[in-house]
Every structure is written in C-alpha cells, then in structure tokens.
Image (cartoon, rainbow, N blue to C red):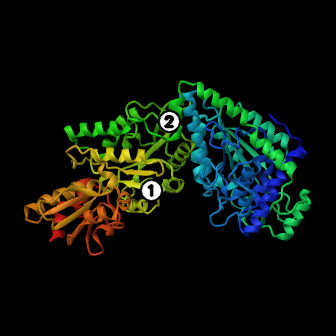
Amino acid sequence: MTHYSADQTRHMANAIRALSMDAVQKANSGHPGLPMGTADIATVLFTQFLKFDASDPHWPDRDRFILSAGHGSMLLYSLLYLTGYSDMTIDDIRNFRQLGARTAGHPEYGHATGIETTTGPLGQGIANAVGFAIAERHLNAAFGDGIVNHKTYALVGDGCLMEGISQEAITLAGHLKLKNLIVLWDDNGISIDGKLSMTDSTNQIARFAASGWAVSAVDGYNAGEISAALAAAQDADRPVFIACKTVIGYGAPTKSGTSGAHGSPLGPEEIAGARKALGWDYEPFVVPNELIDAWRKAGSRGAADRAAWTARLAASPKKEEFTRRNAGTLPANFDAVIAGYKQELAKNPPALATRNSSQNALDVINAAVPETVGGSADLTGSNNTKSKELKPLNAADYGGRYIYYGIREHAMAAAMNGLALHGGVIPYGGTFLVFTDYCRPAIRLSALMQQRVIYVMTHDSIGLGEDGPTHQPVEHMAALRVIPNLAVYRPCDAVETAECWQLALQDATRPSVLALTRQKLKPARIAYVEENLCAKGAYVVAPAEGASHIVIFASGSEVEIAIAAKAKLDAAGKPTRVVSVPSMENFAQQDAAYQAELMGHEKIRIAIEAGVRTGWDRFIGTEGTFIGMTGFGASGPAEQLYEHFGITADAVVKAAG
C-alpha cells in the first residue's frame, strides 16, 4: 500500500476540489459542495484502498465504487480523469453537463467506464450497492477467493439516508452480513433547503448499528483517521458504515458549510477566494504535472493484482464457466431446453394460472441456467418464484440462488439492478403487480441502464379476487408499457409463459416484466410450434375460417375470453379471428409488413384486457370497442368480478353486434 503524507493527500484532494468548482462554474449548473467536502475521503480511498486498474476498467474482480449521492458527480468524474481512465479527458471535464457529454449532470451508466451505476434519484445507489455486494458473495461461493474477492464501496449523503429505500436496503445488508460492503457517509448536516436539523434528527450511527452494521466515525479531513477506519473495515465480519464529518463546499470562504454550496455554482469571487484558501495557484482546469503523476500512479497501482488475477483465472478449471457468465452469454443449449419443454407442454396442454406456469418454466430454466438468482418480497408462495432445486441465499450460504427479500419491494428492485450491473448473475424477483408502484423508480433505472432484470409480477388483474381494489392492478399495465426500453409480457397460458421467459432471458439489454395471473386459465396454444411466437409481440392465436369479419385483440387471461367469444360469433355466422398480444413493445418492433398483415382490415375491432384502455387504440383505433376496466375493482370471487365489470364472452358478442 502506498502511503501519502497529510499534506500530499490534501494537495491531491484539492485537485478534485478545483476541477469540480471550475466545471460547475463553466456549466453554470451543478453541485460543487459534495465533491469539495468529500475530496479527502475519496483521495484516501482511491490512493490506498480501492482495488482497481484504470487501464482495465472492466476487470471483473475490481472493487466497485458507487457514488450514491449522484448529484456530486464531479467527484467521480474528477477521480476518473485524475486516475487515468482513458475515456475521461480534461475536455470531458470542461464539457460537464453539456449535451452529448460523458459528464452528465448525474453519473450515467454506459457514458464512461468507471461509472458502475446510474445514480441521482437518492437512495438508489446504496440499494444498488447491496446488490453488488450480494453478487460478489454469491460468485465468491461459486468460484472461490482466487477468482472473486472484492469490496463494494458506496459514498452516500444525507438525502440517500433519508429516502425510505435506504432503510430497506441497510436492514437487508445487515441481515445478510455482507462484510464486503463499506458505506461512507458524507455527514455535512446540509440539504438544499438549509440545515439538516430543520428536517431530520436521526442518529445514523445508531440506526446502522441497530441494523447489524459495524460502525465508526471519523473526521473527514483527517487522512489518518479515514485510513485507519478503512483499514479496519477490510477485515469486518459484517457491512461497515463510516460516518465522515465534513463541511459542504470545503474551502469556499463564505459558502462552505451552507446550502449555498449545495446545488449551484459558487461564482467567480467565491472561487477566487477558495483558490486562495486552498493554496491552489493554477488556472481553471489546470492540474500540475506532479499531481497528475501522483494520481496516475494511484490509478495503476492495481496492475500487479490484476495480472496475478488473470494468471489465476487462466489456470482455473472454472475459467470457461466464469468467462461465460461474466460475458452475460446464456448456456449453449438454452434454446434447445426451451424447445424441449414446449414439446412436453404440447403433449398434454395444462390448464394453470400463469404464475404456476411460470414456476413450472423456472423448474426447467433454473436447472439449465445456473446464473439465475431468484427471489420474492415475502410472497414466494404466491409469486411462485422458487423452483424446486433453488436453495436460499443467506449469511450461512451465499451459494444459494434464492433471496428472501422480506417486505422490501423497492430495495429488492434496486438490489436486482446492482446484481445485474455487477455481472455474472441474472436476477429475477417477484411481488404483486400492483406493487410495481413500490418498485417503479428502480424499474425505470433498469430500463435506462439497459439491464437484464426480470420482474415477476403476479396477481395481475381483478382476477386475484377477494383482496379487493387495493391489490387489484387496473392502470399498472398501461403505466409500465409507457416506460421506454421495458418489455412488458402478459402471457395467456403455459406455452406463452415459457416463451416470455425465454425472451426475457435472451434480452441482455432490456429489463422485463412478466404479468401473471392468480386464476387458472385454459390453454390457448395446444400444438407445438418451434418458433417463439411471443417474440412477435402479437400473433393470430385463433384464425378465422375464411374471411374474417371481426378481430379480437387480447392479452393474458382475457385471451381465454376472446376465444370463447369467437366460438359464439363463429356459430352465429360471424367469422372471427383472435390475436394474442403478449407484448405491445415487441409488436412495435416488427416490420411494417407484419404489423399491417396482423392488424387486418376488419371493421369490427375489439380489444379485451382487465385493465384500462390506454395503449389499445393502436390496435382498434378510437372507434373500436374496448372491454376492460374504467375504474377501480372490488372485493369478491374472480368469476363474479368479471361478470360484474362486464368482461365476458357475452359482452364481446354483444359488442360485435
């Protein structure tokens, strides 16, 4: 370990302060306070403890650094530039917050290497970090210390800890005894509105201790204290929380320690005063060569560790499997496994709730795809997310593949983002569809970051019955479908469920929601078809005999109703075809010719879904008939509710005229 004097550490930290205040000033927008306040902490971490090699930013066994307080993004960008990440240049720093820049207002995953996750919505980062730490422990159990053995560090602010998701995340981490997780708290006592004492009086150290964390407190400007706390954290037997007392906007002569340094440029006079106070006698965006050299030395100090790791991996009998998983490539026989399962279903098409069909599919999938890690937010028996061979992942056995998340829907979703971002695992987790409201911020980030996270959302309509309108999703399918880059699947039977799982697992750059029923459904797909028809998003599941006069579009449980209505209409001499629409997003990706062929020219156009109409006009037009929900549900048996709300085959026949 390289040791730096207190003066060296402070001078290196001042490079972060100068770049941050200069970039925010040039952009006339941003948050200089956090980078200036935490620069010493970050300098000690990056120069002495963080295991990384700037020349190989994708090294799988690197430590992860998560800037949960993403508004302080210039801290991270400065660190990446100073330590020598090749895609973070001084021009990128100058271009902070400009259109097309790598240096976005908040860290954006994929914009530059070294940005491990997208942060900005406060609390998401600390919950992501829990997922990163779970992934590391799980892969360590599978591949051993020689291949996987690293830390996850998260820098959090007061806002991260005030958000409710943080409580879900820290109690989960404490329960799982994630000793590889180290959280550094920027304890500056300031939020945008002013002093934190106006809004909060939580004893954060006591809170974390009560949640099963090892805790300590340091002076955020005493390099020795910071170093000692981080050194002690390396051998902890539980997650570690280090409270670092800081001053927001450290060095600014009149705005330090005030909300004036939080979310706006300091101004030319204040910056000139800060330069004088910090002893920084350089022009904007200029860092002297001796400091650049010191930082670049820190950025390369992990090269020997990386080389040794590369040699260990090369000699490992598990190299091929580790490499495959880390690349995100599914097993070579995956498609054949799904095809074989579909053939078995065709032999005896089952009448099942799609949540049960999902569990049956998972029995096959989880046996064939060892990198899946499942879970549920205290609804395992209802979501049917635990297949037969999965053992619990817990503090006694990180090698398990099933996480009991407890009643922590939001943290579950955010932790799954961390699991996916870490690499080597494919996470899925379940709750009721109505509780996507609790998961939505994390689901949106899954889509924004293009992560393969699979949300298993059961009890997808009024069909859940007696639990009533608080639990019956009505607007949720429409609300999910409007999130960009999110695949929303609502399968109608066991075959479609298997196909939707296949698509979700194959899609490495898009999260998926599987909306599944509580109630039993008749099979619609009774003959084996090799092609994955759900990949088209919509297809004819029941063709008309001859020229069709009526077309019915439906998804999920309402496909059964559509097929029953078709039988009655056909018998009345009104030829009808039924189109199953398991994924509007996939249908939108088909070529114009296929879309036109599927849409057809029938004048009588009907759509059925036990939800709101939003989204269905693309199939039926504004003049078409929609049979579904216009308000909230009610408590009662499912079959009575469908009758009560007029979502029946007879209602379809009547609408057809």
Give the quadrant of residue 385. top left
Helix, strand, or loop for circle 1? loop
Q: Amino acid at mark 1?
A: Leu
Residue 66 against residue 617 in the figure, above or below: above
Label 2 belongs to which residue? 324
**Residues at circles 2 and 1 in contact by the CB criterion of under 8 Å:** no
Q: Which mark is residue 460?
A: none
Q: Residue 225 placed where, x, y %?
A: 83, 40
Residue 489 against residue 383 in the figure, above or below: below
On screen, residue 429 versus residue 594, left or right, reads right
Q: How many marks?
A: 2
Counting residues from the N terminus, which is met first, the one under dot 2 or under dot 1? Answer: 2
Q: Quadrant of the C terminus?
A: bottom left
On screen, residue 336 versus residue 305, left or right, reads left
Q: Residue 325 placed where, x, y %?
A: 50, 36
Around disc 2, counting alpha carbons within 10 Å, would you say few (fewer than 14), some (14 to 19), or many (20 or more)? some
Q: Residue 612 placed where, x, y %?
A: 34, 65
Q: Residue 393 placed where, x, y %?
A: 50, 33
Label 1 belongs to which residue? 486
Q: Quadrant of the N terminus?
A: top right
> Residue 490: in sight, yes or no?
no
Residue nearer the viewer, 217 or 318: 318
